[in-house]
Amino acid sequence: MSDSYEDRSFAKLFPTKATIPDAARIDPKANPPRMLIDGKVRTVDEDDPDQQLPVYSRVAVRDGNELSPVLLGHEPKLGVLEVGEAMAAAERVLAAGATWATAPIETRITAVEKLAARLAADVERIATLLMWEIGKPVASARQEVTRSIDYIKDTIAELRALDRDRVVYTGVVGHTQHVAKDVTRPLGTVLCVAPFNYPVNEFLTTIIPALLMGNVVIAKTPRFGMLANMALMDAFADAFPPGVVALLPGDGRAVLPGVISHKSNDVFGNAKGTVDVFAFIGSEGAANAILKGHPTPSFVHKILGLGAKNAGIVLAGADIDAVATRLVKGSLGFNGQRCTAEKIIFAPAGAEGDALVAAIAKRVTALPLGMPWDPVAAITPLPEPQKLEVMWGLIGDAVAKGARIANDGGGRGYYSIMRPAVLDRVALGMKIYDEEQFGPVVPIVRYERVQEVIDWHVRSPYGQQAGIHGPDSPTRGDLAMALTSYVARVNLDDVCQRGPDTFGFTAADKSGHGTLSIRAALLSFSRSVIVQSPLRAAIEHV
């Protein structure tokens, strides 16, 4: 299959050692194999190959036309011993009078602000690691870090507002009026597992609200982007008390089973799972495999971001040029490696659909390919080995069943970089009609009736978002209302996206569980306790 699309001329896009800009160079010795456990950043024996693994980049270097991977640093090999130490430290924090859980919110805020200040001072280093580890374009890499800092600041402001504006209830029992206040308490131990596409931002958008609400966090760094998170270890160790946060790199298959299966005994001697909350962004299969190891899975509070197949729906009468520009950005931002990307486009049949496909194909053909430090590069190397083969398999299956590649050179690539493919006339029976591609392929379905779009959503197991593009009309309004039964957000004349962070970010069906926005995240990592009295004065200082 790869023979049809593999093109060794793409090797010239990769740099030689001499042409890598000084600002983008990376020293593997600056990224030793480290972990954060019980408040201490520990480095394994760097001379012992049995305790570490090399971390290579798919942003290769070229010698002639031959490409070689670049060594970025090392990750530690963690196992039962290190996991046990992290879990024991977390249990000590929760057992020692729960001082972190009961600390005034300003104490927790001070710790988080200290972390944010360290993060702000290290933007360039982390952005450079993101460029090399996951191929993220330089502007997006910086934005991931700075957006995370903004998120932290906004979350702190929201926590203060939440604390200041605690809901006060009144009610009557018999002839006596009662007054109550809603108080939030932490849930316990949170296992956070971050995705590779936003390894810093998505990590912090779960870790930070969990910590601010008084929880203890065990965080498994993503398989790609782990060095960027290892760069945060010193800041976490400096900002938080020992045991409150553990950052565990390494192979998830070695680390996660030990964390999720860890047990502790309650006051009656009954064993229960130590992990109280599972915050995970990734595939449904991976989430199920991890949860299967929990001793008492029915008690686990879950916050899950899973797969998505968001539809961009173009109605008759839409502004073709404006819509094409939006959909190319929405489909191919960061190579289409976003859960919120438009992963299928519905275009009207006939001349309007032809014009839309041509406009999208023209814009995709014009997207510059290059290395992540190139400020004009829109398409960059993909971090996952064998990713091109997966994309080629989807393209080949669709073409064999009647689809066509609408843009010049679509699907051609080499090693880790590929020119995006616009697939026109995708239909039922093709893998990409139903499957999430999570990469640079833009499938377009032609429809005769709007009901066909609704039928696709009824059929789809996913339910994150959809976008509708076209003139304001009863048809658009009716379609938007129909889609609210199948997705968690409908975007009108806008691309699918996570932000703004004040909006709820959630999903239906197999796309996720739980809600994340600035306020919703704080509430998701806490439980509500009612303190009430017949006397209003009695609850004033709670």
Image: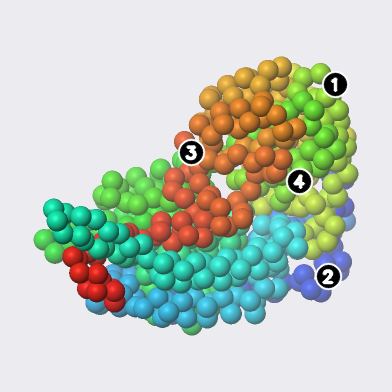
In the image: residue 445, left or right of residue 186: right
**Inter-mark Cα distance, 3 to 2:** 44 Å
The label number, if any, that marks residue 508 in the structure image:
3
Badge 3 density bin: few <14, some 14–19, many ≥20, Cα 10 Å? many
Badge 4 density bin: few <14, some 14–19, many ≥20, Cα 10 Å? some
Task: Name the quadrant of the N terminus.
Answer: top right
Label 4: which residue? Answer: 329
- Tell which circle, 4 or 3, labels the residue nearer the N-terminal end: 4
Badge 1 density bin: few <14, some 14–19, many ≥20, Cα 10 Å? few
- Tell which circle, 4 or 1, labels the residue nearer the N-terminal end: 4
Q: Secondary structure at mark 2?
A: loop
Circle 4: residue type: Lys
**Inter-mark Cα distance, 2 to 1:** 47 Å
Q: Report x, y in % for residue 320.
A: 83, 34
* Tag in front: 4 or 1: 1
Label 1: which residue? Answer: 351
- Tell which circle, 1 or 3, labels the residue nearer the N-terminal end: 1
Task: Name the quadrant of the C terminus.
Answer: bottom left
- Tell which circle, 2 or 4, labels the residue nearer the N-terminal end: 2
**Inter-mark Cα distance, 1 to 3:** 34 Å
- Could you say which quadrant of the image residue 471 lies in? top right
Q: Residue at x 76, y 52 (%)?
A: 380
Q: Looking at the image, which is closer to me, 84 or 522? A: 522
The residue most toward the bottom is: 238
Q: Residue at x 41, y 43 (%)?
A: 288
**Inter-mark Cα distance, 4 to 1:** 23 Å
Label 2: which residue? Answer: 21
In the image: residue 330, left or right of residue 211: right
